[in-house]
């Protein structure tokens, strides 16, 4: 059995309390494996605070954080040489060209002048701005500005990218293009990436690991397949009568739960519950019988794997019930 690859990020009991008693991170202990990891959580969950702490921009109140084995509290300068950072908010100067800005950021990471200029051209080409690289950033669209932020994160030839809400402000086409870029960088360049986002459907498209946090605490950390592929689920959609259907399905031995206003989810279990198997067929029969007996208008009945959003919502609810 081959040993596990070394962790990219490790935190232990990491806590960050701001003045006024606001706790952004609360005893967070988690490990980030190599690859593309989605850091998911609602706005205010602590994602940006964690990223800034990993960069050494914030000092933790207690606990430790390591990036490639370097402790953030004592070796933040070395960490910033190894990490590219794409901030959430727009912070670009409008009166310089993209190539000037990205070259400057390469110099800031320690590259010599010639190497920084070459790296800037390469990074801007990777993000699709090669033809526009001499235009002033102030003339760029939102999507182009996001690409500049990604290019400058790549300029220092990092081993790890920290991307904070990289699709922020983009339209659907722009979000798709950004996600494709992120996926390509992770696949072709072999750079580990942490993508912080509250848009769970996007995270699911590009990541192979997930770390879910809420209120600064860890909800769950696992591979994407473990989050979504362990169990299958039946989606039952009715135009009315969700409460009655939930009660009836539970009475018949299933474990349904409401999802959105008109849907009921029925978990089927682990591997071996695909279409045509006994467990799935039995659940179908039970659902059809319950819907018919209740005379409900059935709009949809289909089987699929879990989606990240559903699982994250479940974890949040469970955490709330425990506290």
Image (spheres, grey):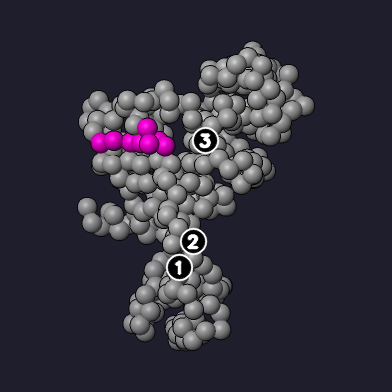
Secondary structure found at label 2: helix
Mark 2: few/some/many CA within 10 Å (<14, 14-19, 20+): some
The one nearer the camera, 88 or 1, is 1
Q: Does 67 sit above or below residue 213?
A: above
Query: Residues at badges 3 and 1 in contact (C-beta under 8 Å)?
Result: no
> Does 66 appear in magenta?
yes
Q: Where does residue 297 sit, x and y in percent of width and height?
A: 53, 76
Q: Is residue 33 visible?
A: yes
The residue drawn where x is 30% and y is 45% is 29
Q: x, y (%) of residue 239?
A: 51, 70
Residue numbers of the magenta segment: 63-70
The residue lying at 50 percent from left, 36 percent from top is 160
Residue sitting at x 28%, y 41% = 12
Q: Is residue 60 left or right of residue 262?
A: left
* Whether label 1 touches label 2, CB < 8 Å: yes
- Up/down of 7 relative to 127, above or below: below
Residue 94 badge? none
Circle number at residue 230: 1
Numbered disc 1: secondary structure = loop
- Between disc 3 and disc 2, whose residue precedes? 3
Q: Main secondary structure of the magenta part?
A: strand
Q: Nearer the viewer, residue 297 or 76?
A: 76
* Residue at x-position 53% and y-position 19%: 110
Residue 218 position in % (x across, y down): 32, 48
> Which residue is denoted by mark 3 in the rendering?
159
Residue 293, above or below 214:
below
Residue that badge 2 annotates: 225
């Amino acid at each position: 059995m081959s040993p596990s690859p070394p962790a990219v990020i490790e935190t232990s009991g990491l806590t960050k309390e701001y003045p006024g008693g606001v706790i952004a991170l609360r005893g967070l202990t988690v490990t980030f494996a190599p690859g593309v990891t989605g850091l998911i959580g609602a706005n205010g969950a602590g994602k940006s605070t964690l990223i800034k702490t990993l960069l050494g921009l914030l000092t933790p109140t207690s606990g430790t954080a390591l990036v490639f084995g370097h402790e953030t509290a004592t070796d933040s300068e070395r960490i910033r040489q190894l990490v590219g950072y794409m901030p959430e908010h727009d912070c670009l100067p409008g009166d310089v060209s993209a190539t000037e800005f990205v070259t400057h950021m390469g110099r800031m990471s320690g590259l010599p002048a010639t190497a920084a200029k070459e790296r800037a051209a390469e990074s801007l080409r990777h993000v699709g701005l090669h033809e526009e690289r001499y235009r002033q950033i102030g003339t760029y669209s939102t999507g182009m500005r996001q690409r500049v932020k990604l290019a400058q994160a790549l300029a220092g030839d990092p081993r790890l990218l920290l991307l904070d809400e990289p699709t922020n402000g983009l339209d659907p086409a722009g979000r798709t293009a950004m996600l494709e870029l992120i996926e390509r960088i992770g696949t072709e360049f072999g750079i580990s990436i942490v993508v912080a986002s509250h848009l769970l459907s996007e995270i699911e498209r590009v990541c192979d690991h997930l770390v879910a946090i809420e209120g600064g605490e860890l909800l769950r950390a696992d591979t994407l397949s473990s989050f979504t592929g362990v169990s299958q689920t039946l989606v039952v959609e009715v135009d009315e009568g969700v409460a009655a259907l939930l009660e009836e399905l539970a009475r018949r031995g299933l474990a349904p739960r409401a999802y959105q206003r008109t849907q009921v989810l029925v978990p089927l279990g682990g591997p071996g519950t695909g279409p045509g198997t006994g467990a799935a067929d039995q659940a179908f029969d039970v659902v059809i019988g319950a819907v018919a007996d209740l005379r409900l208008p059935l709009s949809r009945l289909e089987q699929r794997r879990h989606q990240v959003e559903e699982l994250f919502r479940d974890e949040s609810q469970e955490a709330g019930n425990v506290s």
